[in-house]
Image (cartoon, rainbow, N blue to C red):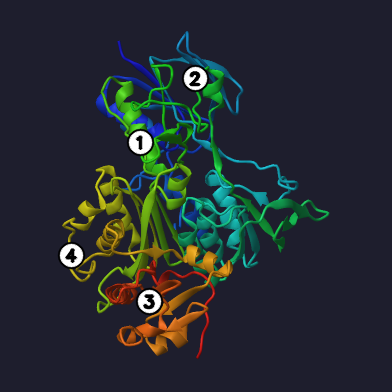
Amino acid sequence: MSKKLVVIGGVAAGPKAAARARRLDPSAEITIVEKDELLSYAGCGLPYYISGLVEDRRQLMATPIGVMRDPQFFAQVKNIKVLNRSLATAIDRAAREVEVQGVDTGEVSRLPYDKLIIATGADPLEPPIPGKDLENVWRLKQVEDADRFRAYLQTDCCPKVAIIGGGLIGMEMTEAVVECKGAVTIIEMLPHVLPMLDADVAYLLEKGMRDAGVTVATSARVERIEGDENGMARCVVTTKGTFDAELVLLSVGIRPNVELARQAGLLIGPSGGIHVNEYMQTSDPNIYAAGDCAEKSCDMRGTWCALPLGSVANKEGRVAGSNAVGHVDRFPGVLGATALKIFDWNVGRAGLSAEQAAELGIPVVTATVAAPDKPHYFPGNQPIILKLVAEKANRRLIGIEGVGLGDVMKRVDVAITAMTAHMTVDDVAQLDLAYAPPYSEAMDVLIHGANILRNKLDGLLKGVTSTQLKAACDAGEDLMILDVRTPDEHQSGRIPGSTLIPLGAVRNRAGEIPRDKRVVAYCKTSLRAWEAICMLNGLGYDNVEILDGGFTAWPFDVHHGA
């Protein structure tokens, strides 16, 4: 007798699970239940459709050869029945049945199953902000929301848009609005945007956003959204001031959609997602969960987390689909790998940030390295900045963050592979990476970063991050900031309070450098600063360190002129 597989959810993990199950079991009876009209669309592409970069919404719902993934496609090509505009309202685990109600008709039916996959996704968080229900306070969850945004932004009104929330969706929508000639204020209650990044890296991105004309308000708690007599939002009132807005986007995060699973008595994990094992099984062995509704094992933390990404959802869906029809596959967990493009900036991260490691009580050493993504002489080279995190006790690479105009993601992906293999920084430094001038320097920036970590772990080098140096200066610490660049570089822009001693003069002018106070040396990338440190160490100095990443990685105010 054919197995009956029911999949609840038809966007990412659900269709992936159903398609995988069909490939492995041609005779299974497979049904997808989806409450909305549209199926299997690329939700992560919605901001790019809004901006106009993706011209036609149908591109988000089509196969690579342009065939629409609608119910007819699933029926004719995959022999999968789709009940769209149908809401799964209850799961009877004892009878192994799902209760389904037609959204338009109200008709109730019951679907029997041998195995069930829950892929109900996640919903936008609704913060308790007065005024959040005003007419032009919008959310972005599905294609219809994107249609409304696109229609509004592609008028000639050049609107003022306030985006509440500085996470991934907020960042992507910032670019979409600016591409449509809108003016953006992004409001984030935490000290910096993209809270998964360390502050010193996030501040670099914030600087780039401000340079692009975006108003960035951080550490700003929203008190209310004020409207006019017509019920339209007109401004957002925060603890950092009031910001005019003709449109407000609420983008403060998501929560896993687990109510159906909760009502069925399935275990909900500490992250708020449905608890699953490595086979994507829930607390009921006949029920699987995948995608944004399921919690994930975080490899570097040893904890559970929510990670709403299409890449993860599709991998989990594949595993759930395989296991639901009798094959065996495992999902090992996540490293929190994340990518973002905003304006000309590329951003990537994975593993633990230094701040996250500190919260977990893991002693770490970090290295920030700034370099071009290709040799300085090669046309089209662009700067990138990487921050690497290594566990002090065993020298393992456990985190990476990258920002810049160049190819950040290549380096992040290599680091992800290294972390997955539990490599040490010594292993990473000796990786035989493909090299040619159009692609990288002879010693790639990732390998430079690994070597800096090795020097630090071996006690050969001390460094300080931009935020640590800024905090020391703000606290009035008596230290010397030593600029070893050329006089022209010094005049074109320097860290406030810097003393200029060009690298070639350091040895002869060492007497001007105090031995009784902390000395932080920097240059453009801190390569010359490292040379200066070596000179000073040879002269008996033990109080010298570099500014990690150099002037390139300094996101704060600078002084100009003589």
Which marked residue is nearer to the observer: mark 3 or mark 2?
A: 3
Q: Earlier in the sequence, mark 3 or mark 1?
A: 1
- Disc 3 designates what residue? 524
- Disc 4 designates what residue? 435
**Mark 3 and mark 2: span between their CA atoms?**
55 Å
Q: Residue at x 67, y 52 (%)?
A: 221
Mark 3 and mark 2 in contact? Answer it, CB < 8 Å: no
Q: Is residue 53 visible?
A: no
Q: Is residue 352 visible?
A: yes
Q: Nearer the viewer, residue 264 or 517?
A: 517
Query: Disc 1 residue type?
Result: Gly
Q: Earlier in the sequence, mark 2 or mark 1?
A: 2
**Mark 3 and mark 4: span between their CA atoms?**
24 Å
Q: Earlier in the sequence, mark 3 or mark 4?
A: 4
**Mark 4 and mark 2: span between their CA atoms?**
51 Å
Query: Disc 3 residue type?
Result: Lys
13 left or right, relative to 246: left
**Mark 3 and mark 1: span between their CA atoms?**
39 Å
**Mark 2 and mark 1: span between their CA atoms?**
20 Å
- Disc 2 designates what residue? 266
The quadrant of the image that shows the N terminus is top left
Query: Disc 4 residue type?
Result: Tyr
Number of the label disc, if any, that sits on residue 333: 1
For label 1, the SS is loop
Residue 456 position within the rendered picture, expressed as x and y whole percent measured from the top left: 31, 60
Which marked residue is nearer to the observer: mark 3 or mark 4?
A: 3
Mark 4 and mark 2 in contact? Answer it, CB < 8 Å: no
Q: Earlier in the sequence, mark 3 or mark 2?
A: 2
Q: Residues within 10 Å of mark 2 (few under 14, many from 20)?
A: some
Residue 418 position within the rendered picture, expressed as x and y whole percent measured from the top left: 26, 48
